[in-house]
Amino acid sequence: MDLEGIIISVSTVAGCGLLISIFLSVFAKKFAVEVNEKEEAVLAALPGNNCGGCGFPGCSGLAAAIVNGEAEVSGCPVGGKKVADEIAAIMGVDASNFVKRVAFVKCNGTCDVAGENYDYSGPSDCRSAAMAPGKGSKACNYGCLGFGSCQRVCDNDAIQILDGVAVIDPERCGSCGKCVNACPMGLIELVPYDANVRVACSSKDKGNITMKACKAGCVGCALCVKTCEYGAITVTDNVAHIDYDKCTRCGACAEKCPKKIINV
């Protein structure tokens, strides 16, 4: 190739490169995504677990929701009060309403009190067991299956299976809610950390049926409702429920409960 051909080739390549760079520069400016500095600051304050415990798709989803006013500054259950305070400072609001929550298993149906309808021999997984006849082998169709699906998703080793029932250590619980989603029976809920009064039963059966299935089940007698002076307890679908915004943690309901399924 002669010198003239080389010069033409180099010029052509250089020209194409220049045109492409100009095009990319214009394209980048035209379609650039504007960065919200406040949203970036909130995201940096979040722990980065991306656990979904806040109800949003990862920490970036929560950060966007907080900045857009769609979530509270205390929306991250894992970060706790420290993170809530940091985000509150970024947003210029108050985070004093933060309430630490921990997971709690609403079942007292251990092996010595819960009846069995048959011997289950399927996969050692709660979701598989819940698909078996009667939602598992336990006589109670609402009780803990005890195969540890919640335990396997816990990143903090906060869950143990003791005598056929999942038990959560509130001191280890990270409040992420993974166990809540893992339980096919819907037995796990996040409750206030300081809530020393908790109903350990989820049976919706009538009292006489519950008593036959489990010696530690709520019979819906409503004695706790009559005892509570603050209107914090109701009986819905034959099982007691506590409104923690009204509960004073006095424990009077637990003392009155004939089945001793209200924990203190």
Image (cartoon, grey):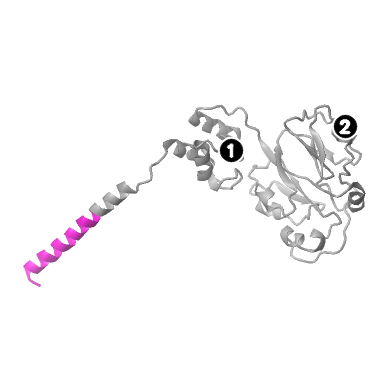
Q: Which numbered disc flags the more N-terminal residue, 1 or 2?
A: 1
On screen, residue 18 versus residue 60, left or right, reads left
Looking at the rendered structure, the secondary structure element under dot 2 is helix
Residue at coordinates 25% horizontally, 54% vertically from top-left?
A: 23
Which circle, 1 or 2, is nearer the viewer?
Answer: 2
Q: Are marks 1 and 2 in contact (CB under 8 Å)?
A: no
The amino acid on which the numbered mark 1 sits, given as a three-letter code, is Gly
Picture coordinates of residue 14, whole percent (x, y): 17, 59
Point out which mark residue 226 bears: 2
* Residue 223, image quadrant: top right
Q: Position of residue 136 (x, y in %)?
A: 80, 60
**In the drawing, what numbered circle is on residue 261?**
none
Q: Residue at x 75, y 34 (%)?
A: 243
As drawn, is 151 to the left or to the right of 69?
A: right
Alpha-carbon distance for marks 1 and 2?
35 Å
Q: Residue tagged by mark 1?
A: 75
Which span is picked out in magenta? 1-21
Crowd around label 2: few <14 · some 14–19 · many ≥20 (10 Å): some
Magenta span includes 6: yes
Quadrant of the frame with the C terminus: top right
| Image position, residue 117 (x, y; %) | 88, 61
Circle 1 SS class: loop
Residue at point 90%, 42% (across, down):
259
Please rate how many residues cluster around mark 1, counting C-alpha atoms within 10 Å: few if below 14, some from 14 to 19, many from 20.
many
